[in-house]
Amino acid sequence: MDLVYTPEQIEFRQRARAWLKDNVPGPRPSTREEAASYDKAWQRRLYEGGWAGLNWPKEYGGAALTGVQSLIWFEECERANAPAYGLMSIAQTHAGPTLIARANEALKSFHLPKILKGESLWCQGFSEPGAGSDLASLKTKGVIDGDHIVVTGQKIWTTGATTADYQELLIRTDPGSERHKGLTWIICDMRSPGITIRPIDTMMGESSINEVFYDQVRIPISNVVGEINNGWSVAMSTLAFERGTTFLRDQIRLSAKVERAIELAKRTRLSEGHLAIDDPAIAEKLAELKAEALGHRAMAIANVSNVDRTGSPGPEGSMVKLLVGGTYKALGEVVTEILGLGMLDYDHCRASNSWAYDFMNSWVVTIAGGTSEIQKEIIADRVLELPRAR
Amino acid sequence: MDLLLSDEQEELRSSFARGIAKELPLERLHGAKGQAADDTSLQIFADLGWLRVSMREEWGGLGMSYAEEVLLFRELGRNLGSLSLLSGVLGARVAAGAGQIDLAESILNGEEVGLIVPERSQSPGPDGAGDARLFGAADCRMAVVILPETASLVDVSMLDDDRSPCLDDLLSMRKFALSRARCVAETQDPGIWWQGSLMTAAMAVGLAEGARDMILEYAKVRQTFGRPIGAYQAVRHPIAEMTARAEHARCQTYYAALALGMGRADASMQVSAARAVAQGAARKNADANIQLHGAVGITNELSAHLLLKRSLVLANLFGSRKVALHHVLNGELMEV
């Protein structure tokens, strides 16, 4: 156990810092099309610098960073105010790894280079109106017709559907099947005839989530990843070489947000007249959140330590998301106290008031990608091995 | 950069856990009303060398780091060990720091010293008037007073044996005027305060885990409406939260132990964050442990109340929550 970086790790940090200093672009535009171009361009630049496919194996063009290197990279990204993956996120962190784990050579050699170079954007077609937390109850069906699969149904909460080139689509191909059996993971070209995309308005005003409707969409069988009717196991293989880094970036950004909230309190007066930071209750709340954020950092490091040593994330993994969500939410609450009426100055987009946006976004943090309630179920089932009622 | 125990550390942790479970099993507290007769454990632990873990080798110590010592206090917290090990570790360091090696050795060999907690954190110290509480056996001849800038051993042999009733009646507590105690050894070493604070955080971590362990076991066997209570989300979700909190506190406490051991600029912030997080985990977990046990949770028959009461004691050692949060807020994040 130590907090010392090796000389190699220090050199790695210096290299990352220097590259980011020279390459981080300006602010991200807010319209969907421009944001998509921006995200692809950033990915292209990362690729040219050798920073694409951070945790992908080298044989697939990845940087194969260890957990600690990933920690350093994300810290330097935060320091340099580097953009997040944005619309490139699913391709880089989800679709790409799944293809590496389970796709055949033809699909890998076609898609992986495009993902690495920022030439294709992906979205995810998993959740349905009737299948969110209980994904295995999904109903969108695929019927085999010669060398195509014909898809009919609906997906929801699909981030980036309007700008994506491809979708990782999970469908039910065995008609009589139930739950995890009889599913197929297939690559869907988003320009296929029969696809209708309907953007979903969210409370933040701007968003990139959508409903996607499939009306007899024909997808070549050659786009199946893994085997037909074995799609659940493909979906489970996505995290095969996860380095515990999924929440690293979230935790680093949350810590930075807490610091910015403290700075905000130092320059914002409450309606009573005194500075927010001079209000004992607000100061105490901010201090609590800062202490929590320090603890998240320690947990994230424990997580990557575990992955680097054993190859798989430890029990901390399932707890980090739960705890980070709680802190994020509490941060939003204290900022509402700091800003007072200022919280109301919001005009449908993050650029108009990032604190108001982040306050609303706290529900995305505690709901998307596995709700806090599901995280607790996962902890109860897998860490605590408590009896089940479901 | 690694926050996992090495093989040696894991072995040490395991031997601490075994030793403490053997000498201080939680079952000993079953239906406990007065002070549990666990005074013999201090001598046993002293004979095992456990008071010497982080002490410098030239002072008779094993020269290990706070990371190892945290492992010991975590197990002690889990099993509601008395505070005598803490006061012994710190008292020996005070004695050695004051140049009194024989006194240090006596303490390391198991002579019990009490722990004094001043009522006012701005206490002027042994020369000034001030009320204080003394935790420790009646026959202690000395006790340790640790303040942020100075640490002392004082003679308490003149105090009478009258115990003050204590909410946590596993501990022997006496109230007295600090001015009555003559200073025996003194050292200007802010590190002792932070060591005490860190080990208190470690005890709170163990306590938080112990509370979770207690209800986890119960949830698997207690039945209601035809099922084990652990099958219901109203029960399993709070236990999951207890687990996440305890893990959060454990990781931060280990991190703080490393930072303090390295003498990092942010060490006091990290230790203070560990106190804040661990104290919160201890209190909330002790609370949930009682709640989820139902009515039996408020009885003396069950040990759950003892965890709650001990969490209150720990909250008052080495600075209150407000003091800890003040250090956190004003500490600067390091770029590492």
Image: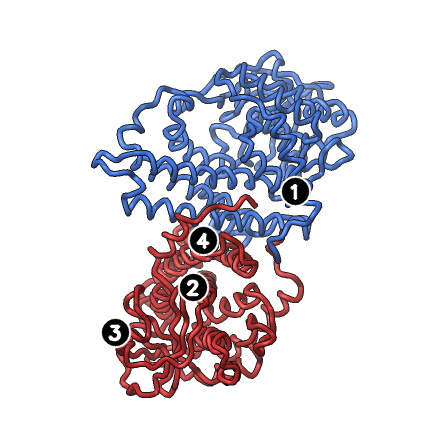
Chain colours: A blue, B red
Q: Is residue B150 above or below residue B266?
A: below
Q: Earlier in the sequence, mark 2 or mark 4?
A: 2
Disc 4 designates what residue?
B269
Q: Quick check: B167 left or right of A171?
A: left
- Asked if labels 3 and 2 share a chain, the reply is yes
Q: Are the two marked residues, 1 and 3, in contact with CB atoms closer than 8 angstroms?
A: no
Chain under disc 2: B
Amino acid type, label 4: Met
Write the residue at 55% across / 28% down: A83
Chain of the residue under the numbered disc 3 shown in the image: B
Q: Which residue is rendered at x = 71% and y = 35% of the image?
A: A63
Q: Mark 1 and mark 4 in contact (Cβ < 8 Å)? A: no
Q: Chain of mark 4?
A: B
Give the x, y percent position of residue A24. Answer: 59, 26
Count of marks, rendered view:
4
Classify mark 2: helix, strand or loop: helix
Of badges 1 and 2, the one in the foreground is 1
Left or right position of B234 against A176: left
Quickly name the residue at label 2: B211
Check the image and name the residue furthest to the top. A193
Up the image or down, A101 lies above or below B57; here it is above
Asked whether the residues under marks 1 and 3 belong to the same chain, the reply is no
Q: Which circle, 4 or 3, is nearer the viewer?
A: 3
Residue B129 numbered tag = 3
Q: Residue at x 26, y 77 (%)?
A: B177
Residue type, label 3? Ala
Q: Is residue A385 visible?
A: no
Between A376 and B324, the one nearer to me in the picture: B324
